[in-house]
Image (cartoon, rainbow, N blue to C red):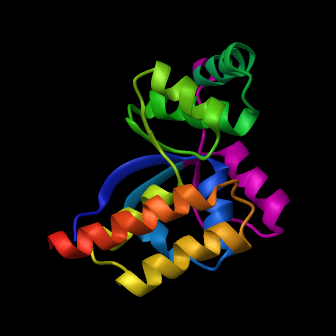
Amino acid sequence: MEKIRRAVLDTGPLIHLDEIGEGKNLEIIENIFIPKEVGEEFKRHRGEKLDIETKELSSKAKSYASLLMQKHKIDLGEAEAIALAKQERINLFFTDDWYAREAADHLNIETHGTLAIVLRAYREKMIKEKRALDTLEKLLKNSSLFITNKIIKEAKEEVKKFEHES
């Protein structure tokens, strides 16, 4: 199994996987980096503390996060996460926020969402096909992730396609 070595996460993927009891999928990432604000947002939304250590932003990164909020119309959590990615020189960022993706893409930071975490966990054989398909269905029906049937259908097709290729 080849884990993702380092990635920064925004609150969205953490919340969405937690809502459906599939936080285990995060184990595909060896070192998860989150800023303090993401940890606090998770606690506000889920009522519990996140079991991931937060990383402190430098004063320069905090200023950069403020600039990102103004320039890209993103929330503090997303802005701090992008600033943390730049601070730690991490080129992989997981978020489900469209504007945060655009901002990160503009800064040449590779972005993916919650679905990519599930698909990668499946591809790396951390979860089986049935669990991957069930997780995708639960994300559609039982989480606060804004997603369409069409996107879930495409993700399920990716699961089945990968099964036939391996």
Q: Which of 131 and 74 is in front in this view?
A: 131
Where residue 60 appears, x then y in whole percent? 59, 18
Q: Picture coordinates of residue 98 (x, y %)?
A: 62, 36
- Relative side of 52 to 2, left or right: right
Please provide percent x and percent y for residue 127.
37, 81
At a point 42% along the width and 30% down the height, the residue shown is 109
Tell whether position 137 is magenta: no
Give residue 91's quadrant in the image: top left
User: Which contiguous range is marked in magenta?
Assistant: 34-60
Whether residue 28 is visible to the viewer of this picture, yes or no, is no
- Residue at 57% x, 62% y is 52
Give the answer, above or below, for where 120 lies relative to 103: below
Q: Decide if residue 59 is on the left or right side of residue 132.
A: right
Q: 41 or 119: which is nearer to us?
A: 119
Q: How many labels does the image show?
A: 0
Q: What is the quadrant of residue 63 in the picture?
A: top right
Q: Which image quarter: residue 59? A: top right
Tell me: residue 148, above or below residue 76: below
What residue sits 70% from the left and 39% below the top? 77
Q: In which quarter of the image is the N terminus?
A: bottom left
The C terminus sits in image quarter:
bottom left
Left or right of 138, for residue 127? left
Residue 14 visible in the displayed image = yes
Q: Residue at x 55, y 33 (%)?
A: 101
Residue 88 versus residue 121: which sits nearer the camera? 121
Q: Where 57 sits versus 160, above or below?
A: above
